[in-house]
Amino acid sequence: MRKSFYIPRIVSDAETFYEYNDQMNFNATLNLFANMGENIGKISNELKLVYTDISWSEIKGFRNRVVHDYINIDTFMVFDIIKNDLLKLKRKLMEVVALELSKGNLDKEEYEVAKRSFYYRHINFEYSEG
């Protein structure tokens, strides 16, 4: 998703983002949103109850819209999420991952596999406060 953080610097509006690079960036971004929602669906309800400031159901709901209603997806909404919400969500999720790894509640080996994954090569997994 790291590259998605730069999209507002490259294009100024949702329509340009949609058309930019023959729609490949838009489609790739939706694919990563779908993947994020799919993986959030694997998080235990107990963990979700600890971090109630994250809109788990909205993320999962957006994943469902991307996957099941792709043709009608609102490009303006996608651009707005990237521009206004994605970086804040990433910071919060990285905070959760760091805390839960330190508590031993997440599988460190699985986390390391994800960090080395070719699919996630564009994601900066390093957590820093601030």
Image (cartoon, rainbow, N blue to C red):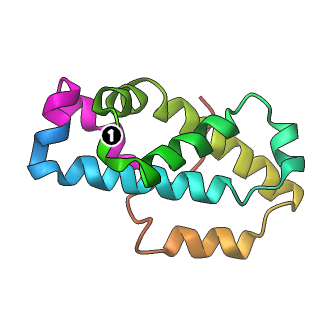
Q: Can you tell which quarter of the image residue 48 is in?
A: top right
Label 1 CA crowd tier, 10 Å (few <14, some 14–19, many 20+): few
Can you give x and y, in whole percent of width and height, for residue 23 in the image? 16, 49
Q: Can you tell which quarter of the image residue 72 is in?
A: top left
Horizontally, residue 62 falls left or right of residue 21, namely right
> Total label count?
1
Q: Is residue 2 above or below residue 14?
A: below
- Element marked by disc 1: helix
Q: Is residue 16 above or below residue 33?
A: above
Q: Is residue 105 magenta?
A: no
Residue drawn at (49%, 28%), measured in percent from left and top?
Answer: 85
Q: Is residue 2 magenta?
A: yes
For the residue pair 14 and 8, the one nearer the viewer reads as 14
Secondary structure mostly seen in magenta is helix
Can you give x and y, in whole percent of width and height, for residue 101 in the image? 78, 58
Residue drawn at (81%, 52%), measured in percent from left and top?
Answer: 100
Which quarter of the rendering shows the C terminus?
Answer: top right
Residue range (magenta) = 1-17
Circle 1 residue: 72
Can you give x and y, in whole percent of width and height, for residue 11 in the image? 16, 30
For the residue pair 61 and 26, the one nearer the viewer reads as 61
Q: Is residue 24 above or below residue 82?
A: below
Residue drawn at (12%, 42%), measured in percent from left and top?
Answer: 20
Kindly identify the amino acid type of the residue bearing the numbered disc 1. Answer: Asn
Horizontally, residue 18 falls left or right of residue 5, namely left
Can you give x and y, in whole percent of width and height, for residue 102 in the image? 82, 55
